[in-house]
Amino acid sequence: MIRRLRVTFIVVSLASMAAVLLVILGVVNWMNYRQVVNDADRVLDILAENNGTFPERGDPGESVGRKRRMAPPGMSPETPYESRYFTVCFGEDGTVLRTDMGRIAAVDETEAEEYARRIRQMDAARGFLNQYRYVKQDTDDGQLIIFLDCGRSLAHVRSFLGVSAAVAVTGMAAVLLLLVLLSKKAVKPYVESYEKQKRFITDAGHEIRTPLTIIDADAELIALETGENEWVEDIKKQIFRLRDLTEDLIFLSKMEENNRKAERMEFPISEVAAETAQSFQALAKLQGKTFESSIEPLLSYTGEMKSIQRLFSILLDNALKYSPEGGKITFRLEKRGRNLWVTVSNTAEPMSKEQISHLFDRFYRVDASRNSGTGGHGIGLSIARAIVNAHKGKISALSPDGKSLTIQVIL
């Protein structure tokens, strides 16, 4: 249980950090990408307003006849000279009127016209085609399509994404290492409290046995002197319940010990299951309930035979107690691959997922008022889970149709 707590602590901490990093990296990379798109669109808007070229202006300091290209507002003066773009102009009938390839060398005229024809078939007025950001501009004699090469900017975006992902993975690995090293210290207060609780239950259980024995003996003496009566019977009944609860708590505490040394041996589990099922067959018939068992023969298992037998008894007793009158109980034992599957099902009143998730908690009852007369103490399934965990197995509860309860055990 302590190991499972440490694993849960590590997983939750790591998942929380991963979620935060994912959000941060996602926002940062998305903003980086949007910046590239916005810058490209600003350049394309300038080109579209000037019929596919940057505006030019005269400079008093330059010689006569020389012109200098204007930079878009807010951009570097070098932007017109750094930008790589090409344009294709179509007539109203779809024929190519002209192409301008003077500002790019990566594509030829044929490729440019092919790109432009593909864009004409799209509904979007602007977007990406491979590494080129494009915009459509209607003109008096047709349509002008302008392509801006964003390959270098997109490469920087991808590079930043890769670097940030690598840094995040490295950071996650470092955090995982720290969590593994420090998780033992983090859960130490809980472990100490849990160990004290188990020690208290065990010690208190042993101390309670003596007064219970004395009270039981005194009740017998009173019965001999005064004869049997309802008060003596009630005392004996409560002594039995308290002794049974004490034994269950001590057993549960021992099963959950981390350094517990179990004496395991191979035994015929099919025979144990059949004997247990047979003992509940008559009880189910007496209560007017249907009991069916399907046990695969000649199966063996290496473990604690008494504990496994108690596991079967707990599951069948629970199914019998909480099935309604005229209900049906099914007990199955079969081998699937390398594992043994134990399934106990019984008809039951509808239960919510939250109720089912608490079935293995100590002293939990789905309906305390309804179950008060069924006997038991509400720790049977807790003991069942402890037995399964001690054998490195898995136990789960589900209600597939909402009208029955199924407990599945994988050994």
Image (spheres, grey):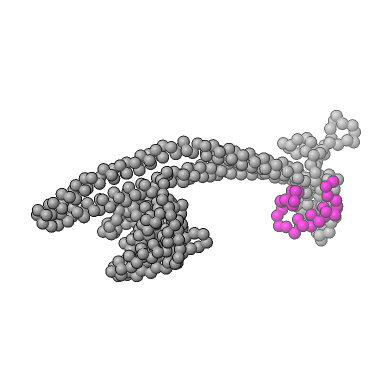
Residue 274 visible to the viewer: yes
Query: In the picture provided, is 73 more to the left or to the right than 402?
Result: right
Residue 288 x, y percent position in the rendering: 30, 70
Counting every numbered tag in the picture gives: 0
Q: Residue at x 27, y 57 (%)?
A: 375
Closer-to-camera residue (126/384):
384
Q: Identify whether 57 is placed above or below 352.
A: above
Q: Residue at x 39, y 62 (%)?
A: 272
Q: Identify whether 290 is placed above or below 238.
A: below
Quarter residue 302 falls in: bottom left
Query: In the picture provided, is 121 more to the left or to the right than 222?
Result: right
In the image, the segment drawn in magenta is: 105-134
Considering every residue shown, the one lying at the far left of the view is 226
Closer-to-camera residue (31/57):
31
Q: Residue at x 37, y 58 (%)?
A: 309
Residue 387 x, y percent position in the rendering: 40, 53
Residue 26 x, y percent position in the rendering: 61, 44
Query: In the picture provided, is 267 more to the left or to the right than 100?
Result: left
* 129 drawn magenta: yes
